[in-house]
Amino acid sequence: MSRLLVACAVLLGASSAFAQAPAAPAPKAAPTATAPKTAPAAPAATKPDPRKAVLERTQAGLAQLPAPKPEDVKSIDSLLKALYDVISGPAGAPRDWQRFRSLFYPGATLVPLVHSPTVPGLHARPFSTEEYITLSAGAASTQGFFEKETQRQSLGYGDLVQVMSTYEARGTLDGPVIAKGVNSIQVFNDGQRWWVMHIVWLDERTAGIKVPTDLTRK
């Protein structure tokens, strides 16, 4: 009995010692990988506003234009008279290209309709006012040219007017007619004066038909 008691005491003491021993530390969890920090997104590039570029270009063009003769730009009649006047003259006589420039709004074009020797149909050949001056100044040094309006039809809305102006061209003031055709001239009034915006022209030889008296398409 005493041996049993001793054995129980030993077992109880051992159990008590185990219970009082500090628990083994729990294994540490593996560190969680952190996602790399991403750089802040760059702000979206601002697209240029084409309206601003056009406005700036137009304002610069207006500032560079020579002042017009007030009588040239007071009406459609006076504007077209000045236009025909300034491109006409005898061979070797310099044209008043400053006056010519003053009639056109910045960005205006002058467009002959022509035939190509290789491709059928009509083809437009747009010139800026400066390109037209360069071309015409060279021709005027050796060739006379006189162009006059013979008839006109106009169609308008507010201060925007489309003028169909029939013309005759001669090599001398009273010489034979060398060409007939139609200038399609777009003009407008900005509240201060009349401007030429675009001209497109077609002559009878290129069109292959005579200019009709009523300018309707035949």
Image: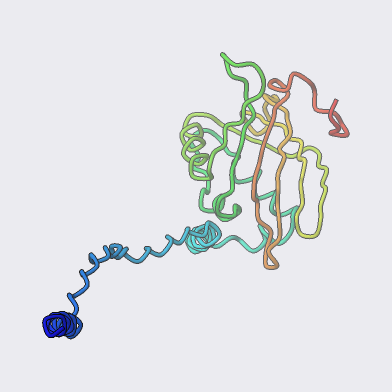
Q: Nearer the viewer, residue 69 or 195?
A: 195
**Residue farthest to the front, as pictured:** 1
Percent across and percent down for residue 41 are: 38, 63
Figure quadrant of residue 211: top right
Identity of the residue drawn at 37% across and 63% down? 42
Which residue is located at x 65 percent, y 56 percent? 195
Query: What is the x, y in percent for residue 51?
Result: 56, 59
Measuring from the top left, give residue 121's x and y in whole percent: 67, 20
Residue at the outermost right position: 214
In this image, 145 relative to 32: left or right?
right
Of the pair 53 and 105, the residue shown nearer to us:
53
Q: Residue at x 70, y 47 (%)?
A: 186
Residue 19 at what x, y percent from top left? Answer: 20, 82
208 is higher (above) or lower (below) than 51: above
Q: Would you say residue 30 is visible in this rendering?
A: yes
Tell me if residue 14 comes above or below residue 36 in the rendering: below
State which quadrant residue 170 falls in: top right
Does residue 22 show up? Answer: no
- Quadrant where the C terminus lies? top right
User: What colouring does the structure picture have?
Assistant: rainbow
